[in-house]
Amino acid sequence: PVVRRIVHLRWKKRLGPVQIADRVGVAASTVHRVLVRCRINRLAHVDRATGEPVRRYEHPAPGDLLHVDVKKLGNIPDGGGWRYVGRAQGDRNRAATPGKLRNAHHQAKMGTAFVHTVLDDHSRLAYAEIHDDETAATAIAVLRRAVAWFSARGVTTRRVLSDNGSAYRSHAWRDTCHALRITPKRTRPYRPQTNGKIERFHRTLADGWAFARLYTGESQRRKALPGWLHEYNHHRPHTAIGGLPPISRLTNLSGQYT
């Protein structure tokens, strides 16, 4: 019973050995030994959202599974957004951007950039396009181009994993996957951890491209995406694959005969 209570407090409350010892009535050193024995002495071993042990997976070959998702970003007004120029100047830039509709507060509506991303589970090789919507028709068109892009690099797509967004639940998405000979899969509801690789890629995308520097307009940021993707795929070391760039896991490229 004492061990069960220690484990419960660790998983559900994220408490340390000293705090758990105070509640359970044992020494902190005893709590630490229990946590080590149960392999939850580091919070990195526990999923932050559910409190369950982290389960990681990786498919054995490129193309075995493609992760797909959409990253939503607010469009940047002419002159720069508030992250770099401050709230006051950002509001002025937003109001001065031509051709924008107004909301109920008479502020310019900048709109949203929908970054459709596709990530290979094994290699972490990434493909992305920016659109003004996330409809099923757009998602399907992105999938077709992504499959062709991966095929040009010697990767045959077998499965695709998505969340439960309306585009990915549509019959058109299912029929397109079958036409491409791809097995469509979806995560369990409210379990983004299953699609965690692309969620982590979105954080890298935001830090390395979307908010990396001052952009004086949305068109400038969109033009910078292909260059950043090339840097990510061909040059950026990826810690999950031994510090190598994702392209290194594709063994049938020119110059690689392993």
Image (cartoon, helix red, strand yellow):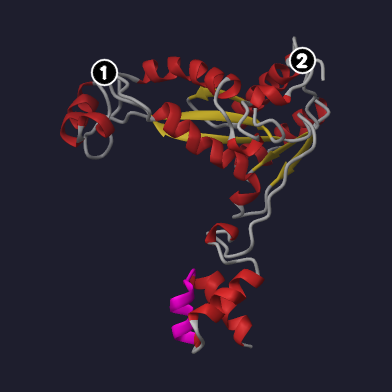
For the residues marked 2 and 1, what is the alpha-carbon distance in whole angstroms? Answer: 50 Å
Residue 92 percent across, percent down from the top left: 17, 27
39 vs 91, nearest the viewer: 39
Q: Secondary structure at mark 2?
A: loop
Magenta stretch bounds: 14-23
235 vs 131, nearest the viewer: 235
Q: Residue at x 56, y 41 (%)?
A: 199
Q: Is residue 258 left or right of residue 39?
A: right
Residue indicated by mark 1: 98
* Residue type, mark 1 in image: Pro
> Which quadrant: the C terminus?
top right
Q: Is residue 122 left or right of residue 10?
A: right
Q: Is residue 17 left or right of residue 198?
A: left
Q: Residue at x 24, y 20 (%)?
A: 79
The image quadrant that residue 230 belongs to is top right
> Which quadrant: the N terminus?
bottom right
Indicate yes or no whether the magenta region holds residue 22.
yes
Q: Residue at x 54, y 72 (%)?
A: 10
- Labelled pair 2, 1 in contact (Cβ < 8 Å): no
Residue 122 percent across, percent down from the top left: 72, 34
Count of numbered tags: 2
Residue 147 percent across, percent down from the top left: 72, 22
Q: Residues within 10 Å of mark 2 (few under 14, many from 20)?
A: few
Residue indicated by mark 2: 256
8 vs 101, nearest the viewer: 8
Residue 202 percent across, percent down from the top left: 51, 36
Kindly give the residue lying farthest to the top in the view shown: 254
Indicate yes or no whether the magenta region holds residue 113.
no
* Residue type, mark 2 in image: Gln
Q: Main secondary structure of the magenta part?
A: helix
